[in-house]
Image: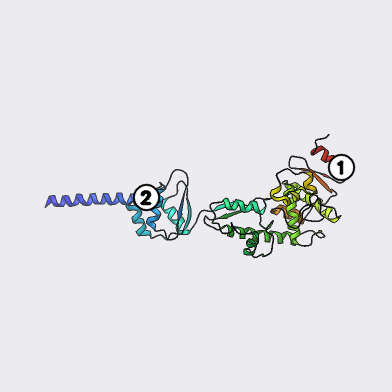
Amino acid sequence: MRRLIIGIGLAMVLGAGVAGWLLLDWQQFRQRPLTRAGEVNLWLDSGTSFQGMVRQLESLGVTRLDWRWRLLGRLESPVLQAGEYRIEPGTSVMGLIETIEAGRVRKHRFTIVEGWTVSEMRAALTMDTRLRKVAADYSPERLMQQLGCPGCEPEGRFLPETYFFVRGSSDLALLERAYTAMEAALEEAWSDRDVGLPLDDAYELLVLASLIERETGKPAERDRIAGVFVRRLERGMRLQTDPTVMYGLGEDFDGRLRRVHLRTDHPWNTYTRHGLPPTPIALPGRASLLAAAHPAEGTALYFVSRGDGSHQFSDTLAEHNAAVDRYIRGRP
Protein backbone atom coordinates (compact mmCIF):
# COMPACT_ATOMS: atom_id res chain seq x y z
CA MET A 1 0.00 0.00 0.00
CA ARG A 2 2.81 2.33 0.89
CA ARG A 3 4.50 1.64 -2.43
CA LEU A 4 1.25 2.40 -4.23
CA ILE A 5 0.90 5.72 -2.45
CA ILE A 6 4.49 6.60 -3.23
CA GLY A 7 3.98 5.62 -6.88
CA ILE A 8 0.85 7.72 -7.11
CA GLY A 9 2.67 10.63 -5.52
CA LEU A 10 5.57 10.34 -7.92
CA ALA A 11 3.17 10.13 -10.84
CA MET A 12 1.40 13.26 -9.64
CA VAL A 13 4.67 15.11 -9.26
CA LEU A 14 5.84 13.93 -12.66
CA GLY A 15 2.47 14.83 -14.19
CA ALA A 16 2.57 18.25 -12.61
CA GLY A 17 6.08 18.75 -13.93
CA VAL A 18 5.06 17.69 -17.42
CA ALA A 19 1.97 19.87 -17.25
CA GLY A 20 4.07 22.82 -16.11
CA TRP A 21 6.56 22.24 -18.88
CA LEU A 22 3.77 21.99 -21.46
CA LEU A 23 2.16 25.18 -20.14
CA LEU A 24 5.46 27.03 -20.27
CA ASP A 25 6.15 25.72 -23.79
CA TRP A 26 2.63 26.77 -24.85
CA GLN A 27 3.10 30.29 -23.51
CA GLN A 28 6.50 30.60 -25.13
CA PHE A 29 5.09 29.29 -28.41
CA ARG A 30 2.47 32.06 -28.57
CA GLN A 31 5.16 34.73 -28.31
CA ARG A 32 7.84 32.91 -30.30
CA PRO A 33 9.19 34.74 -33.37
CA LEU A 34 8.22 32.97 -36.57
CA THR A 35 11.39 33.91 -38.46
CA ARG A 36 14.68 35.47 -37.55
CA ALA A 37 15.80 35.92 -41.17
CA GLY A 38 14.47 38.36 -43.76
CA GLU A 39 10.80 39.15 -44.20
CA VAL A 40 8.45 36.57 -45.71
CA ASN A 41 5.20 37.15 -47.61
CA LEU A 42 2.15 35.02 -46.88
CA TRP A 43 -0.76 34.93 -49.34
CA LEU A 44 -4.15 33.69 -48.09
CA ASP A 45 -6.85 32.95 -50.62
CA SER A 46 -10.47 33.43 -49.66
CA GLY A 47 -11.65 30.41 -47.68
CA THR A 48 -8.17 29.29 -46.57
CA SER A 49 -8.48 27.16 -43.42
CA PHE A 50 -6.37 27.66 -40.32
CA GLN A 51 -4.52 24.41 -40.97
CA GLY A 52 -4.04 25.46 -44.61
CA MET A 53 -2.47 28.70 -43.42
CA VAL A 54 -0.07 26.80 -41.14
CA ARG A 55 0.83 24.49 -44.02
CA GLN A 56 1.76 27.55 -46.06
CA LEU A 57 3.87 28.87 -43.19
CA GLU A 58 5.55 25.47 -43.05
CA SER A 59 6.29 25.58 -46.78
CA LEU A 60 7.80 29.04 -46.31
CA GLY A 61 10.16 27.61 -43.72
CA VAL A 62 9.04 29.71 -40.77
CA THR A 63 7.32 27.04 -38.63
CA ARG A 64 6.00 23.47 -38.67
CA LEU A 65 2.57 22.08 -37.97
CA ASP A 66 2.50 20.40 -34.53
CA TRP A 67 0.17 20.01 -31.55
CA ARG A 68 0.61 23.61 -30.48
CA TRP A 69 -0.73 24.97 -33.77
CA ARG A 70 -3.63 22.50 -33.60
CA LEU A 71 -4.41 23.57 -30.05
CA LEU A 72 -4.18 27.24 -31.04
CA GLY A 73 -6.65 26.67 -33.85
CA ARG A 74 -9.14 25.04 -31.47
CA LEU A 75 -8.75 27.55 -28.65
CA GLU A 76 -8.62 30.76 -30.67
CA SER A 77 -10.71 29.82 -33.74
CA PRO A 78 -9.21 32.82 -35.62
CA VAL A 79 -11.14 34.35 -38.51
CA LEU A 80 -8.68 34.60 -41.40
CA GLN A 81 -8.93 37.59 -43.73
CA ALA A 82 -7.82 36.88 -47.30
CA GLY A 83 -4.87 38.86 -48.68
CA GLU A 84 -1.12 39.22 -48.61
CA TYR A 85 0.67 39.59 -45.29
CA ARG A 86 4.24 40.60 -44.53
CA ILE A 87 5.96 38.53 -41.83
CA GLU A 88 8.83 40.65 -40.63
CA PRO A 89 11.71 39.33 -38.54
CA GLY A 90 10.61 39.06 -34.92
CA THR A 91 6.88 38.70 -35.66
CA SER A 92 5.35 36.40 -33.04
CA VAL A 93 2.77 33.70 -33.60
CA MET A 94 0.02 35.72 -31.94
CA GLY A 95 1.23 38.91 -33.61
CA LEU A 96 0.66 37.27 -36.99
CA ILE A 97 -2.75 35.91 -35.97
CA GLU A 98 -3.87 39.35 -34.78
CA THR A 99 -2.60 40.94 -38.00
CA ILE A 100 -4.51 38.45 -40.15
CA GLU A 101 -7.71 38.72 -38.10
CA ALA A 102 -7.54 42.52 -38.42
CA GLY A 103 -6.95 42.25 -42.18
CA ARG A 104 -3.82 44.43 -42.08
CA VAL A 105 -2.71 43.31 -45.53
CA ARG A 106 0.55 44.34 -47.16
CA LYS A 107 0.41 47.60 -49.15
CA HIS A 108 2.31 47.94 -52.41
CA ARG A 109 3.08 51.18 -54.22
CA PHE A 110 2.91 52.28 -57.83
CA THR A 111 4.33 55.65 -58.85
CA ILE A 112 3.03 57.56 -61.85
CA VAL A 113 6.01 59.65 -62.87
CA GLU A 114 5.65 63.33 -63.69
CA GLY A 115 6.07 63.85 -67.41
CA TRP A 116 5.08 60.32 -68.42
CA THR A 117 2.70 60.02 -71.34
CA VAL A 118 -0.43 57.94 -70.93
CA SER A 119 1.17 55.26 -73.08
CA GLU A 120 4.19 55.08 -70.78
CA MET A 121 1.95 54.92 -67.72
CA ARG A 122 -0.17 52.11 -69.15
CA ALA A 123 2.92 50.16 -70.22
CA ALA A 124 4.26 50.35 -66.66
CA LEU A 125 0.93 49.17 -65.27
CA THR A 126 0.91 46.22 -67.66
CA MET A 127 4.39 45.20 -66.48
CA ASP A 128 3.39 45.30 -62.79
CA THR A 129 2.63 41.68 -61.84
CA ARG A 130 1.06 42.69 -58.52
CA LEU A 131 -1.95 44.23 -60.25
CA ARG A 132 -4.84 42.32 -61.77
CA LYS A 133 -5.17 43.29 -65.42
CA VAL A 134 -8.63 44.58 -66.31
CA ALA A 135 -7.95 47.66 -68.44
CA ALA A 136 -4.71 46.52 -70.10
CA ASP A 137 -6.44 45.84 -73.44
CA TYR A 138 -8.89 48.73 -73.28
CA SER A 139 -8.73 51.21 -76.12
CA PRO A 140 -8.27 54.85 -75.05
CA GLU A 141 -11.95 55.43 -75.87
CA ARG A 142 -13.17 52.53 -73.77
CA LEU A 143 -10.89 53.47 -70.89
CA MET A 144 -12.25 56.99 -70.69
CA GLN A 145 -15.80 55.70 -71.00
CA GLN A 146 -15.17 53.39 -68.03
CA LEU A 147 -13.84 56.37 -66.08
CA GLY A 148 -17.00 58.36 -66.73
CA CYS A 149 -15.58 60.72 -69.33
CA PRO A 150 -16.76 59.39 -72.71
CA GLY A 151 -15.22 61.17 -75.66
CA CYS A 152 -12.37 62.60 -73.57
CA GLU A 153 -8.74 62.30 -74.54
CA PRO A 154 -6.85 60.34 -71.85
CA GLU A 155 -3.55 62.23 -72.18
CA GLY A 156 -2.79 64.38 -69.15
CA ARG A 157 -5.80 63.22 -67.12
CA PHE A 158 -4.02 61.09 -64.48
CA LEU A 159 -2.20 62.71 -61.57
CA PRO A 160 1.44 61.70 -61.10
CA GLU A 161 1.73 60.49 -57.52
CA THR A 162 2.52 57.34 -55.56
CA TYR A 163 -0.56 55.16 -55.11
CA PHE A 164 -0.76 52.36 -52.54
CA PHE A 165 -2.70 49.17 -53.24
CA VAL A 166 -3.01 45.56 -52.12
CA ARG A 167 -1.87 42.71 -54.34
CA GLY A 168 -4.68 41.58 -56.59
CA SER A 169 -6.21 45.05 -56.97
CA SER A 170 -7.11 45.91 -60.55
CA ASP A 171 -5.23 48.30 -62.78
CA LEU A 172 -8.57 49.96 -63.54
CA ALA A 173 -9.12 50.73 -59.84
CA LEU A 174 -5.72 52.43 -59.66
CA LEU A 175 -6.44 54.41 -62.84
CA GLU A 176 -9.77 55.53 -61.39
CA ARG A 177 -7.97 56.91 -58.34
CA ALA A 178 -5.37 58.70 -60.47
CA TYR A 179 -8.07 60.14 -62.73
CA THR A 180 -10.15 61.36 -59.77
CA ALA A 181 -7.05 62.87 -58.15
CA MET A 182 -6.21 64.82 -61.31
CA GLU A 183 -9.78 66.08 -61.62
CA ALA A 184 -9.59 67.42 -58.07
CA ALA A 185 -6.09 68.91 -58.49
CA LEU A 186 -7.05 70.57 -61.77
CA GLU A 187 -10.24 72.01 -60.35
CA GLU A 188 -8.31 73.43 -57.40
CA ALA A 189 -5.67 75.00 -59.66
CA TRP A 190 -8.28 76.45 -62.03
CA SER A 191 -10.45 77.93 -59.30
CA ASP A 192 -7.38 79.58 -57.70
CA ARG A 193 -5.76 80.79 -60.96
CA ASP A 194 -4.48 84.31 -61.52
CA VAL A 195 -6.95 86.74 -63.05
CA GLY A 196 -6.57 87.47 -66.75
CA LEU A 197 -4.82 84.32 -67.96
CA PRO A 198 -5.27 83.77 -71.72
CA LEU A 199 -6.97 80.41 -71.06
CA ASP A 200 -10.61 79.61 -71.78
CA ASP A 201 -11.12 76.68 -69.40
CA ALA A 202 -9.49 74.24 -67.02
CA TYR A 203 -8.59 71.89 -69.86
CA GLU A 204 -6.41 74.55 -71.45
CA LEU A 205 -4.68 74.99 -68.11
CA LEU A 206 -4.03 71.23 -68.11
CA VAL A 207 -2.54 71.47 -71.61
CA LEU A 208 -0.31 74.38 -70.57
CA ALA A 209 0.80 72.52 -67.45
CA SER A 210 1.85 69.55 -69.58
CA LEU A 211 4.09 71.80 -71.70
CA ILE A 212 5.70 73.18 -68.55
CA GLU A 213 6.20 69.64 -67.23
CA ARG A 214 8.05 68.51 -70.34
CA GLU A 215 10.15 71.66 -70.67
CA THR A 216 11.81 71.65 -67.26
CA GLY A 217 12.38 69.48 -64.25
CA LYS A 218 13.73 72.40 -62.21
CA PRO A 219 11.14 73.46 -59.61
CA ALA A 220 12.44 77.03 -59.58
CA GLU A 221 11.92 77.39 -63.34
CA ARG A 222 8.37 76.14 -63.73
CA ASP A 223 6.62 79.45 -63.12
CA ARG A 224 9.18 81.29 -65.30
CA ILE A 225 8.53 78.85 -68.18
CA ALA A 226 4.82 79.39 -67.61
CA GLY A 227 5.35 83.15 -67.76
CA VAL A 228 7.07 82.92 -71.15
CA PHE A 229 4.28 80.76 -72.58
CA VAL A 230 1.56 83.06 -71.26
CA ARG A 231 3.22 86.20 -72.63
CA ARG A 232 3.63 84.55 -76.04
CA LEU A 233 -0.04 83.53 -76.04
CA GLU A 234 -1.06 87.06 -75.11
CA ARG A 235 0.98 88.49 -78.00
CA GLY A 236 -0.22 85.94 -80.54
CA MET A 237 3.27 84.45 -80.87
CA ARG A 238 3.72 80.77 -81.59
CA LEU A 239 4.88 78.83 -78.56
CA GLN A 240 7.63 77.02 -80.49
CA THR A 241 8.30 74.40 -77.85
CA ASP A 242 10.17 71.24 -78.93
CA PRO A 243 8.32 68.70 -76.74
CA THR A 244 5.07 69.33 -78.63
CA VAL A 245 6.80 68.46 -81.91
CA MET A 246 8.25 65.29 -80.42
CA TYR A 247 4.87 64.26 -79.03
CA GLY A 248 3.15 64.76 -82.37
CA LEU A 249 5.73 62.61 -84.14
CA GLY A 250 4.83 59.70 -81.87
CA GLU A 251 6.64 56.47 -82.70
CA ASP A 252 8.32 58.17 -85.69
CA PHE A 253 10.48 60.21 -83.31
CA ASP A 254 13.86 58.48 -82.94
CA GLY A 255 15.18 60.67 -80.13
CA ARG A 256 16.82 63.30 -82.32
CA LEU A 257 14.87 66.42 -83.26
CA ARG A 258 15.73 67.75 -86.72
CA ARG A 259 14.81 70.92 -88.59
CA VAL A 260 12.55 68.96 -90.91
CA HIS A 261 10.52 67.94 -87.87
CA LEU A 262 10.02 71.58 -86.88
CA ARG A 263 8.71 72.33 -90.38
CA THR A 264 6.44 69.29 -90.63
CA ASP A 265 2.93 70.42 -89.78
CA HIS A 266 0.70 68.41 -87.45
CA PRO A 267 -1.82 69.43 -84.76
CA TRP A 268 0.81 69.45 -81.97
CA ASN A 269 3.51 71.36 -83.86
CA THR A 270 3.71 74.70 -82.07
CA TYR A 271 6.29 75.88 -84.61
CA THR A 272 3.73 75.75 -87.43
CA ARG A 273 0.55 76.50 -85.46
CA HIS A 274 -0.55 79.23 -83.09
CA GLY A 275 -1.95 78.69 -79.62
CA LEU A 276 -1.93 75.64 -77.43
CA PRO A 277 -1.86 72.11 -78.88
CA PRO A 278 -5.20 70.28 -78.95
CA THR A 279 -4.38 67.98 -76.02
CA PRO A 280 -1.84 67.70 -73.22
CA ILE A 281 1.45 66.09 -74.22
CA ALA A 282 2.19 64.43 -70.86
CA LEU A 283 0.95 63.93 -67.31
CA PRO A 284 1.71 67.13 -65.38
CA GLY A 285 2.31 67.07 -61.65
CA ARG A 286 0.84 69.38 -59.05
CA ALA A 287 3.79 71.79 -59.29
CA SER A 288 3.26 72.28 -63.02
CA LEU A 289 -0.48 72.82 -62.51
CA LEU A 290 0.35 75.44 -59.91
CA ALA A 291 2.86 77.12 -62.25
CA ALA A 292 0.31 77.23 -65.07
CA ALA A 293 -2.22 78.84 -62.73
CA HIS A 294 0.31 81.33 -61.32
CA PRO A 295 2.94 82.15 -63.98
CA ALA A 296 5.83 84.36 -62.93
CA GLU A 297 5.76 88.00 -63.96
CA GLY A 298 8.55 89.22 -66.19
CA THR A 299 9.51 90.27 -69.69
CA ALA A 300 11.21 87.16 -71.11
CA LEU A 301 9.73 85.78 -74.33
CA TYR A 302 12.34 83.14 -75.09
CA PHE A 303 14.32 80.42 -73.33
CA VAL A 304 16.88 77.83 -74.38
CA SER A 305 18.35 74.86 -72.56
CA ARG A 306 21.81 75.31 -71.08
CA GLY A 307 22.40 71.59 -71.33
CA ASP A 308 22.37 70.99 -67.58
CA GLY A 309 18.61 70.92 -67.09
CA SER A 310 18.32 74.68 -66.61
CA HIS A 311 17.41 77.37 -69.16
CA GLN A 312 18.67 80.75 -70.31
CA PHE A 313 15.82 83.27 -70.53
CA SER A 314 15.87 86.18 -72.97
CA ASP A 315 13.69 89.24 -73.62
CA THR A 316 14.55 89.74 -77.29
CA LEU A 317 15.13 87.55 -80.32
CA ALA A 318 18.69 88.87 -80.65
CA GLU A 319 19.46 87.83 -77.07
CA HIS A 320 17.85 84.47 -77.67
CA ASN A 321 19.85 83.82 -80.84
CA ALA A 322 23.04 84.65 -78.97
CA ALA A 323 22.04 82.19 -76.23
CA VAL A 324 21.31 79.52 -78.86
CA ASP A 325 24.76 80.07 -80.38
CA ARG A 326 26.36 79.67 -76.98
CA TYR A 327 24.43 76.75 -75.50
CA ILE A 328 23.28 74.79 -78.57
CA ARG A 329 25.87 75.50 -81.25
CA GLY A 330 28.79 75.88 -78.85
CA ARG A 331 29.89 79.21 -80.25
CA PRO A 332 31.56 81.74 -77.89
The residue drawn where x is 48% and y is 54% is 84
Tell me residue 36's x, y (percent).
43, 44
Check whether the beta carbons of the residues at disc 1 and disc 2 lie within 8 A of each other: no
Instruction: Please name whichever residue, 208 or 31, is drawn nearer the observer in this view of the structure.
Output: 208
Tell me residue 253's x, y (percent).
71, 47
Q: Name the residue under label 2.
A: 29
Bin the neighbour count of mark 2 within 10 Å (Cα to Cα): few under 14, some 14-19, many 20 and up. some
Q: Any mark on residue 319, and which?
A: 1
Tell me residue 255's x, y (percent).
71, 44
Q: Which colour scheme is used?
A: rainbow
On screen, residue 184 versus residue 130, left or right, reads: right
Q: Of helix, strand and loop, which one carries label 1?
A: helix
Bin the neighbour count of mark 1 within 10 Å (Cα to Cα): few under 14, some 14-19, many 20 and up. some
At label 2, the amino acid type is Phe
On screen, residue 226 versus residue 77, left or right, reads: right
Residue found at the far top of this picture: 332
On screen, residue 167 versus residue 23, left or right, reads: right
Instruction: Please name whichever residue, 282 or 260, is drawn nearer the observer in this view of the structure.
Output: 260
Instruction: Please name whichever residue, 237 or 314, is drawn nearer the observer in this view of the structure.
Output: 237
The residue drawn where x is 57% and y is 54% is 164
